Image: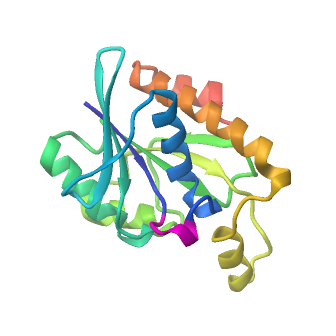
């Protein structure tokens, strides 16, 4: 079984914001496979599907971003699985140029509170991440918060849609067994 975990904040005020690109990507993948999410008791909404014989659970934590690890831990405890081999986390990254994708198989949280929470709840830094480049505003704290919690502009819409289309293909290829190095070579930009 594979788990695709999209990170984001719950609530309409965060819908389609930069920080919620993980939710947008998992929604795009679910839509491509005609599945919808339903509430679960594991602090998340989930969708189940089969891709090329592999069972897949799509996960959107219903906690806020800073407590995403609570849902990840609960899902793995309930369904079984290994954070290091069976999970892909979809997450925003301000240090990546806008609209770029990057696979990363291990590393620190890089200041991302959702990743910090997953690391704290699972005890691992060696789980797969698919990062979505947001670019970076100036480094004043207030500007960063406003940028991350802001919505994508109309001018960015085509690039965002392209990024989501590419991520859907990349997720499918990971489920089908492509290695992280193969995926990195193909999708990292």
Which of these two is toward me, 104 or 57? 57
Residue 85 seen in render: no
Tell me: residue 97, above or below residue 70. above
Tell me: residue 115, above or below residue 132. below
Left or right: where 186 falls relative to 182: right
Residue 106 rendering spot, x and y as whole percentages: 44, 47
Magenta highlight range = 9-14
Q: Residue furthest top?
A: 52
Q: How is the image coloured?
A: rainbow
Magenta stretch holds residue 168: no
Tell me: residue 57, above or below residue 115. above
Residue 129 rendering spot, x and y as whole percentages: 47, 45
Which of these two is toward me, 64 or 174? 64
Magenta stretch holds residue 11: yes
Q: Residue at x 53, y 27 (%)?
A: 181
Q: Residue at x 50, y 52 (%)?
A: 23
Left or right: where 6 falls relative to 145: left
């Amino acid at each position: 079984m594979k788990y695709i975990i999209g990170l984001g904040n719950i609530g309409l005020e965060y819908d389609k914001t930069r920080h919620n690109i993980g939710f947008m990507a998992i929604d795009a993948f679910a839509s491509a496979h005609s599945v919808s999410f339903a509430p679960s008791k594991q602090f998340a909404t989930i969708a189940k599907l089969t891709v090329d014989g592999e069972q897949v659970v799509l996960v959107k934590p219903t906690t806020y971003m800073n407590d995403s690890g609570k849902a990840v831990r609960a899902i793995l405890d309930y369904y079984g699985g290994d954070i290091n081999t069976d999970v892909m986390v979809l997450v925003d990254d301000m240090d990546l140029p806008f609209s770029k994708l990057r696979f990363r198989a291990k590393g620190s949280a890089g200041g991302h509170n959702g990743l910090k929470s997953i690391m704290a709840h699972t005890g691992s830094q060696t789980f797969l991440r698919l990062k979505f480049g947001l670019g970076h505003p100036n480094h004043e704290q207030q500007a960063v918060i406003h940028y991350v919690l802001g919505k994508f502009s109309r001018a960015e819409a085509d690039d965002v849609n392209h990024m989501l289309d590419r991520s859907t293909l990349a997720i499918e290829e990971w489920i089908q067994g492509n290695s992280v190095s193969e995926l990195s070579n193909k999708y990292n930009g």
